Image (cartoon, grey):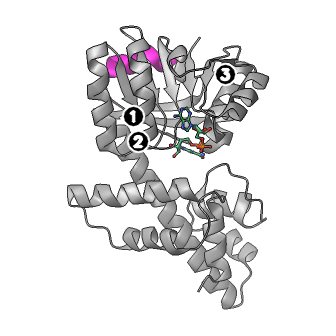
Amino acid sequence: MIGLIGLGNMGLAMVRRLVTGGHPPLAYDLDPARRALAETAGARVTETAAACATHLVVLSLPNDQVVGAVLSALLPAMPRGGVIADTSTLDPLAARRFATEAAPYGVAYLDAPVSGGPAGAAEGTLTMMVGGQKGGLDAARPDLARIASRIVHVGDAGAGQVAKLVNNLLVATHLVAAAEALRLGARAGVAPDALLAVINAATGRSGATEVNWPRWIGNGHFDSGFSAGLMRKDARLAGALATSVGAPLDVCDRAISVWGHSGVADDADFNRVAATIFEGYR
Ligand code: NAD
């Protein structure tokens, strides 16, 4: 039985996937309402994070501070040789620090952020990018493969988070670019559906035009399960990473600032930012 801490949009979808596959996890969340949902879904819910300690614990938490607090309770309870696969999106420097903190306990902390959203978690089709000890990943891989159909070891501790931030910087930038370009086409007299029919068969396509627009933005169904606040966190972390390694951003930096001033609430679906730009927020 694996442990799973953080039962939000992603964590609860992972619980459902594991239960459906016949592997119900030990599960914990600070919020009793989320614990109740996990219990109903078939997880064995615990009253503390430490009670989830087992050979493999998956984390799905909002930010560095929360992961740090959870690890300080969890690490002393972990068995030596255990693995923590952290699917949260975090600062790569924090991930490196957590791997160092876990080592004296004989625990491999892997930064293992994911792409694919709650739908990918529920279907077991997440892409997981892993930084940290290869041996820890080898041990955890059969369990992690129940939620992630593609698992790539990208390097040492922190490398998984670097890969995730690079990916999400592109998503954030593509969404802004697609919204502005489609607004241009619409104002020049060509409907978005006609534009997308062309773009998605031509060379301008991206995830924004092939997935986000048809599935969420174009039909007004803002239920992706990924919040604007979490995407802002990712964009901010990517910007800070660029500064720290001396990789100047120009176009992407503009996109990061658009995410900041679009006026969409942090708890709204992230696709609303593109919809707001398309409708003409200024
Ligand atoms: P969420 O806000 O829906 O869930 C976070 C959960 O963590 C909440 O249920 C909250 O109660 C719980 N939590 C907060 N503090 C806690 C603590 N101290 N102990 C235990 N639980 C605590 O977020 P989410 O959308 O599920 O995302 C989780 C992580 O995965 C984030 O880092 C996010 O950036 C990343 N991510 C999200 C998506 C997505 O599509 N939603 C996709 C890829 C990666």
Q: Which residue is mark 1?
A: 68
Around disc 3, counting alpha carbons within 10 Å, would you say few (fewer than 14), some (14 to 19), or many (20 or more)?
A: many
**Could you say which is closer to the camera, residue 228 or residue 19?**
228
Is the residue 116 above or below the residue 217 in the image?
A: above
- The location of residue 263, given as percent across then percent down, is 59, 73
Which region shows up in magenta? Answer: 132-142
* Residue 141 colored in magenta in the image: yes
Whole-angstrom CA distance, mark 2 to mark 3, is 25 Å
Q: Is residue 203 visible?
A: no
Q: Residue furthest left?
A: 246
* Residue 68 colored in magenta in the image: no
In this picture, residue 240 sits left or right of residue 47: left
Q: At 31% across and 68% down in the image, what residue appears?
A: 249
- Amino acid type assigned to the residue bearing label 3 in the image: Leu
Report which quarter residue 193 is drawn in.
bottom right
Q: Which residue is mark 2?
A: 64
Q: Quadrant of the N terminus?
A: top right
Q: Nearer the viewer, mark 3 or mark 1?
A: 1
The answer to whether the residues at label 1 and label 2 have Cβ atoms under 8 Å apart is yes
Whole-angstrom CA distance, mark 3 to mark 1, is 25 Å
Ligand 1 lies in quarter: top right
Report which quarter residue 15 is drawn in.
top right
- The location of residue 158, given as percent across then percent down, is 31, 38
- The location of residue 18, given as percent across then percent down, is 66, 21
- Amino acid type assigned to the residue bearing label 2 in the image: Asp
Q: Which residue is mark 3?
A: 18
Q: Nearer the viewer, mark 2 or mark 3?
A: 2
Whole-angstrom CA distance, mark 1 to mark 2, is 6 Å
- The location of residue 27, given as percent across then percent down, is 62, 22
Q: Is residue 239 visible?
A: yes
Query: Which tag, 2 or 3, sits closer to the chain's start?
Result: 3
